[in-house]
Image: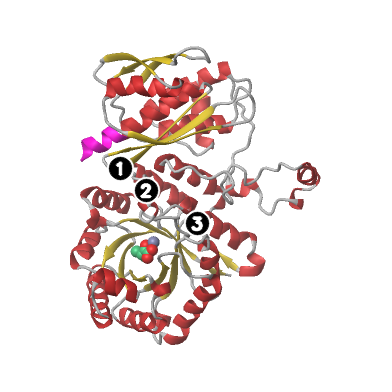
Amino acid sequence: MEKITIFDTTLRDGEQSPGATLNVQEKLEIARQLDRLGVDVIEAGTPVNSPIEMEAVSLIAREVRRPIICGLARAMPEDIEAAARALEKAAHPRIHVFLSSSDIHLMHQIKKDREEVIMMAVEACKRARAHVDDVEFSPMDASRSEPNYVYQLLRAVIDAGATTVNIPDTVGYATPDEFAALIQGVFQSVPNIGKAVVSVHVHDDLGLAVANSLAAIRAGARQVECTINGIGERAGNASLEEIVMALRTRRDYFAFTTSIDTTQIYRTSRLVSDLTGIPVQPNKAVVGANAFRHESGIHQDGVIKERSTYEIMNPADVGVPGTTLTLGKLSGRHAFRQHLEEMGYTLSDEALTRAFAAFQELVTKKKEVDDRDIEALVTEERRNIVEAYHLDHIQVSCGDHSVPTATVRLTTPDGAVLADAALGTGPVDAVYRAINRIVQVPNKLTEFSVKSVTEGIDAQGQVTIRLESEGRVYTGRGAATDIIVASAKAYMNALNRLIAARQKR
Ligand code: KIV
Ligand code: ZN
């Protein structure tokens, strides 16, 4: 069976999702997990964008040796030089050059004619090839471009040294039949196409990204660009896990393989969600919380009798954690660490100490603790932030006939203990106001959601929040059996990220 190359762009297009900014260490952590997942190419970022982006791509290029590491560049000398510098130490470097090809973009955005664009693209690919042997070219907005012009452009860039030509549906406009026809046209009308790999990069504005990618594969594409959880610009990109599981589950139909270790999918999905702060919708295919849950009695009955009656994939194949845990009240730190490692989490000593303390507290409060609870605990520890303020204590008084009041105590790394109190419209509002009185960083809370980690009245609540400050979005998460405490933790998590980002700037 032929293999489809999986090009992951979570760290580049995925990071373009509003609020998804990752720091350098978080990017490296995700790149390492993508390596474990088995992706063929990691698009690590756009080095010219900022010194942080440059640092992240260089670090990933140095540390992650198996996959191809790719840096994105506009068809401009400075972008290509920056990408080449960032990839200097990579074992397998690739420069990905892009330039618009649609008349809409040419006329309104880049203000160049078609001939000029071909010349720029050719120059850019030659320049990139002077640095690396592996060069990818993307005619941006290809699906809204005149097909014959796209074919002409592809022919020119392949002659200039492009080894992969990627056809983007930049604004998620195409339908599967149309997109497949465009790809077939590439094979029929680009005479030197045999010298390059044909790739696709599809956005999900009409919810067709995965369908379009799969249609393109059937039409001859052999590389797909995708992201974990489908995150990305606007409505996101084609989701890696959906493409991979479609190819695997319907191997009878597609007849292709990938190099993905599917048992790493769930873990990768959680890591990306935790670090970007973008939650996975419960009904999301493959990795959503409900993807393998059966609600109706008839379905439950069928699955108990024979799993395949209502399940086309085995949850274990995508690495969904079991619900049985062999740890309890008497488990020690060593057993806890070992269990985390079996779940695929490696924490620093400091983070482990905090997670273990939280675990010990949880087992005294909750009758049954399972892997989903443990996951919620480590989520906070994995969010790689230096805490400018640590939540030490909160106390709340509320009820239907009283004014919600909160007292909060925070500590700082230099040992200061800061306490304040506030009234609010509800207990969470009171806690947030008390925190604001201490921290004094202007921000606006734009999203607040709470969900239950497991079933049962004693379940932990996991709170996810988003706040905005100076035009940037920051996310925070917190989990606890008390949802007011979880809310406070989530707020502190987002505030600490905000403060860290400000200090970095
Ligand atoms: O969507 C797009 O066209 C892109 C290109 C840079 C490939 O992200
Ligand atoms: Zn894109």
Marks 3 and 1, the one that precedes in the sequence: 3
Which SS class for mark 2?
A: loop
Residue at point 56%, 47% (across, down): 287
Q: Quadrant of the C terminus?
A: top left
**Nearest-to-viewer mark from 3 and 1:** 1
Which SS class for mark 3?
A: helix
The colour scheme used to paint the residues is secondary structure
> Badge 3 local density, few (<14 within 10 Å), some, or many (20+)?
many
Q: Main secondary structure of the magenta part?
A: helix
Q: Amino acid at mark 3?
A: Leu
Give above or below for 358 relative to 140.
above
Residue at point 62%, 43% (across, down): 290
Where is mark 1, residue-wise?
A: 472
Where is mark 3, residue-wise?
A: 240
The picture quadrant for ligand 2 comes to bottom left
Evaluate if marks 3 and 1 touch, with contact meaning CB atoms under 8 Å apart. Answer: no
Which SS class for mark 1?
A: strand
Give above or below for 480 relative to 40.
above
Marks 2 and 3, the one that precedes in the sequence: 2
Q: Amino acid at mark 1?
A: Arg
Q: Quadrant of the N terminus?
A: bottom right
Evaluate if marks 2 and 3 touch, with contact meaning CB atoms under 8 Å apart. Answer: no
Q: Amino acid at mark 2?
A: Pro
- Residues drawn in magenta: 498-505
Of residue 31 and residue 153, the one placed in the foreground of this image is 153
Where is mark 2, residue-wise?
A: 18
